[in-house]
């Protein structure tokens, strides 16, 4: 079965712009989580969605938002981009609540803010 | 909030030597998972530990979950160049919808 698909793979944006990233989970998976990965900071939890409801949110400013659709696909949006938002953004899907079972990660979206 | 500390952050070993990475949580965990991320890749699930004192083995990899369910370790025996990558632990507290907290990861370099 197809894995987790994230689009786009690479993005270059200018400070102040906004960006939307997309994640298509494995078919049948209802849980999608988003993470920001930067060198030296590891994987920082952004948010988790389960059946279209946000179940958990990490310690990120309100510029970071997300949503999940009825087909479990998820998007995250970052508004008013800052240089520090440059990172690899990973989404992970699982069949149950995140952390309860194996999470499958996508290849990530590499965002560069200039 | 919950913190998961992981040490060491970096480890260089000669091929054939053993390697261990440790995770410690500030709170009792419902379970702990381990992931491996190869350079340029994405994290890939290795294993999940749930029970207090649990020990699981996958070939040369041994995973342990502490009795108090607050710490865990991953031990690799006789490392190979294919073991290169960053190993992450990820813990989740029990009760309701708790978020998963990842350790900072241990980057393993194996010198042939």
Image (cartoon, coloured by chain):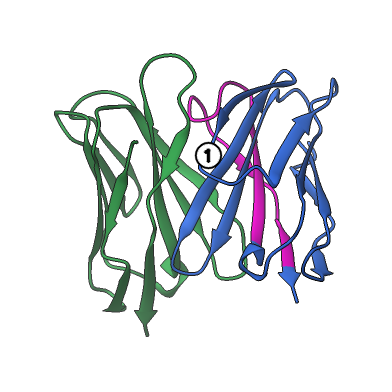
Which residues are the magenta region? A88-111
Image: A58 above or below B78: above
Image-based side of A38 in relation to A31, left or right: left
Quarter of the figure that contains the N terminus of chain B: top left
Neighbor class of circle 1 (other Cα within 10 Å; few <14, some 14-19, many 20+) is some
Q: What residue does disc 1 label?
A: A58
User: Which chain comes out blue in the rendered image?
Assistant: A
Q: Please say whether residue A94 is one of the residues in the magenta stretch.
A: yes
Q: Is residue B1 above or below residue A95?
A: below
**Position in image of residue B87 (x %, y %):** 41, 57
Give the chain letter for green: B
Residue sitting at x 75%, y 22%:
A28
B73, above or below B104, in the image: above
| B70 or A80, nearer to the observer | A80
Whether the magenta-drawn stretch holds residue A110 is answered as yes
Residue appearing at x 28%, y 51% in the figure: B5
Residue at the bottom extreme? Answer: B112
């Amino acid at each position: 079965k197809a894995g987790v698909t994230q689009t786009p793979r690479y993005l270059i944006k200018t400070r102040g712009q906004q960006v939307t990233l997309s994640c298509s989970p494995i078919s049948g998976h209802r849980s999608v989580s988003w993470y920001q990965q930067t060198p030296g900071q590891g994987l920082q939890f952004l948010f988790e969605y389960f059946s279209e409801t946000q179940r958990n949110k990490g310690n990120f400013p309100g510029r970071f938002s997300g949503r999940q659709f009825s087909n479990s696909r998820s998007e995250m949006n970052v508004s008013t981009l800052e240089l520090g938002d440059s990172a690899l953004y990973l989404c992970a899907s699982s069949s149950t609540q995140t952390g309860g079972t194996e999470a499958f990660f996508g290849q990530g979206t590499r965002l560069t803010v200039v | 909030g919950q913190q998961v500390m992981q040490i060491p952050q970096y480890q260089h070993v000669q091929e054939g030597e053993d390697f261990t990475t440790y995770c410690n949580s500030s709170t009792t965990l419902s379970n702990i998972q381990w992931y491996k991320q190869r350079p340029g890749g994405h994290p890939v699930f290795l294993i999940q530990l749930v029970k207090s004192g649990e020990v699981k083995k996958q070939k040369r990899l041994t995973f342990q979950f502490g009795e108090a369910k607050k710490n865990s370790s991953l031990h690799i025996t006789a490392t190979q160049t294919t073991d290169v990558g960053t190993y992450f632990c990820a813990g989740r507290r029990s009760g309701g919808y708790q978020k998963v907290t990842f350790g900072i990861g241990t980057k393993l370099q194996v010198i042939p």
